[in-house]
Amino acid sequence: MRLWNFSAGPATIPLAVLEQVRAELPDWHGVGCGVMEMSHRGKIYTGIYEKIVADLRQLMDIPEDYAILFLQGGATLQFSQIPMNLLDGGSADYLTTGAWSEKAVKAGQRLYGDSIREAGTSADASFTRLVDPASMRLNPKAKYLHFCSNETIGGVEVFDLKQLGGAVQAGVPLIADMSSNILSRPINVRDYGMVYAGAQKNIGPAGVTLVIIRKDLLGKATTAIPALLDYAEEEKNTSMLNTPPTFAIYMAGLVFEWLLKQGGLPAIAQQNQAKAELLYKTIDGSGGFYANPVALDCRSWMNVPFTLKDKALDPIFLEESEKAGLLALKGHKLVGGMRASIYNAMPLAGVQALVGFMNDFMHRYG
Amino acid sequence: MRLWNFSAGPATIPLAVLEQVRAELPDWHGVGCGVMEMSHRGKIYTGIYEKIVADLRQLMDIPEDYAILFLQGGATLQFSQIPMNLLDGGSADYLTTGAWSEKAVKAGQRLYGDSIREAGTSADASFTRLVDPASMRLNPKAKYLHFCSNETIGGVEVFDLKQLGGAVQAGVPLIADMSSNILSRPINVRDYGMVYAGAQKNIGPAGVTLVIIRKDLLGKATTAIPALLDYAEEEKNTSMLNTPPTFAIYMAGLVFEWLLKQGGLPAIAQQNQAKAELLYKTIDGSGGFYANPVALDCRSWMNVPFTLKDKALDPIFLEESEKAGLLALKGHKLVGGMRASIYNAMPLAGVQALVGFMNDFMHRYG
């Protein structure tokens, strides 16, 4: 029996998608084998792949002057690949709003030292808000500005680029790590030089990384990096410089189809907002029994960390919630307490079940 | 209906494994979600992963002083990662026996120029045999010697390290790209410094790369490479520096279990030999109607390229074989003609069906 799964990632997949995978696994559309068993260069897979790219272009309204790449190594490898491809002898600005954007800075500095500049941080607020624009030290000649649009651990989300203040500069491409909020609501891709995301939250199974990059940013890397890590080489080779993770990409495609059937990103955004509001309302209305530390303007719709007033109740909450069929609510060790990840595939009914449990728990222990 | 699938990779998966995946997809062992939907750091997945590593150690008799890593980027990324990790300011020798070992040389030279030495090649024989040991120019101080144990395109396989002649030198670690023949028969891991393989032939779905490396070779890389590409960092972090491709790894584990049930590598080797012998016997006994150009001592058990005497029959052979339920027999464009990939998951019955078709086709068109 499937339970409500609040895992931060790898995360719950829509049941309809899993059922389709089960049906198609040994024999895709009567061709005699499954998608994972066919050549990535054959006509059948190529056709599947082209539809996946077209569906994603439609879903996110991605202009033709942006390349869509399906790579490997997760956001973590992107933290290195981005400066390898785009630093181009210059320097880049980074905003730090939590554990993930901090990792991006460290991975970049490992390779390029001071050329990776922390242009602003909310570390002074324990990453419970976005960077105060007044505190930013921006370089107008930066090769790019990097930020994380949703911090999976801290639960801090950027909803509007205006929240970045002066960091949005003409001529400085914005690069966003959208691993945990991609496809959760419409964005204007044209505002970005590049967005990227590991798949294992809102796209599909772990093992594929989506990169959407404006084509004029391609081709700045030198041969000092492996060809496989060069976006321009991958674009030229349709992300097939090596055998791609075909099954994970196929599943991403099924998720894209599922999203289109739901009404696309505007429809899923409404659901996501309703789910998040219900959960935050429960936390804020608990008279302090539950608490979420994040500033109101940047509370994530996807990852909702919360603590109990009495920490001694944490293990009891986790044990009882699991018995109630609510999985993976333990918070990340960096922030402690609980975390409910409520990605696209989590229906409102799951959040209602969680909220029901939370209210019941509060009445029994509050 | 499943047909006989001779794809070179991604390749056919044992049906028993696919059926188990189907059964476990939405709910693994009653835990309430599938393997692809759970945290890679949680107890359940960690337990699954530990069993996978233990099963592989048993299957291949891997000593404890060898690390087992599950990485991403395929053999192609390994072509760069190997010198990044092991060149250590020196130079390395490479043997070239076909398209894949040639790619390894080129990827290495892209980063390290002449430090990547082609110590021998069989290009003069159009890659239809191994390198003549008499022609090798070996460096006794090489940091490693790289070769490909099975050329997927040319169908050239190394069965005994003695075939490498003087290239096996005390103090020079052997590194073998085993992408297309790993797990096909027993090998002595202790003979190697490192073996590696993309999964999509004999291990599981595309998207995971197996690296088995002697631990004393770890830790020679500098911070000039991304941490994710440093074997030592991956070993320290149980291949979890980023979210690993958990579903592909889980499927690899099911394949390992399936192999153990078959009787392990000695048993599968017998089957593989019988399959290959049947196919080569058919080719050689066709009075020249079919031909395989590879020298007798290195004809691959896994990938059997063959040509028709009359090239004009190629498209007819491919069309009719597909109608007969024999998939993906088209040869690689580099060698032309046909290719039957008969990995572990292809039963003898599949090769019997192929041979039956080949004999029938010859009688009709010969």
Image (cartoon, coloured by chain):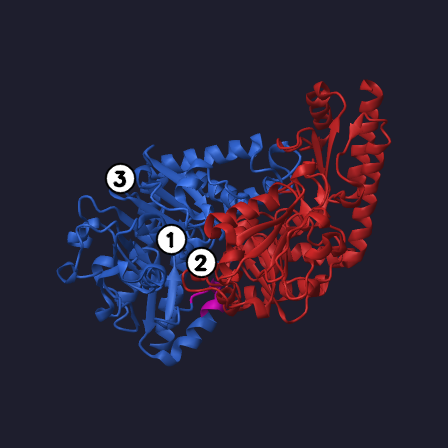
Chain colours: A red, B blue
User: Is label 3 in a helix, a strand or a loop?
Assistant: helix
Q: In the rendering, at what x and y percent does residue A218 appear?
A: 54, 67
Residue type highlighted by circle 1: Ser
Mark 2 touches mark 1? (CB < 8 Å): yes
Task: Decide: few, some or many residues near mark 1? Use Cα within 10 Å; few <14, some 14-19, many ≥20.
Answer: many
Mark closer to the chain start, 2 or 3: 2
Question: Are the residues at dot 2 and dot 3 in contact (C-beta closer than 8 Å)?
Answer: no
Magenta stretch containing residue B326, yes or no? Answer: yes
Q: Position of residue A109 (x, y in %)?
A: 50, 49
User: The C terminus of chain A is located in which quarter?
Assistant: top right
Residue type beneath disc 2: Gly
Q: Is residue B332 left or right of residue A317?
A: left
Q: Name the chain under label 2.
A: B
Looking at the rendered structure, whether the residues under marks 2 and 3 are on a common chain is answered as yes
Asked if badges 2 and 1 are on one and the same chain, I answer: yes
Report the span colored magenta: B321-329
Residue under pointer 1: B179
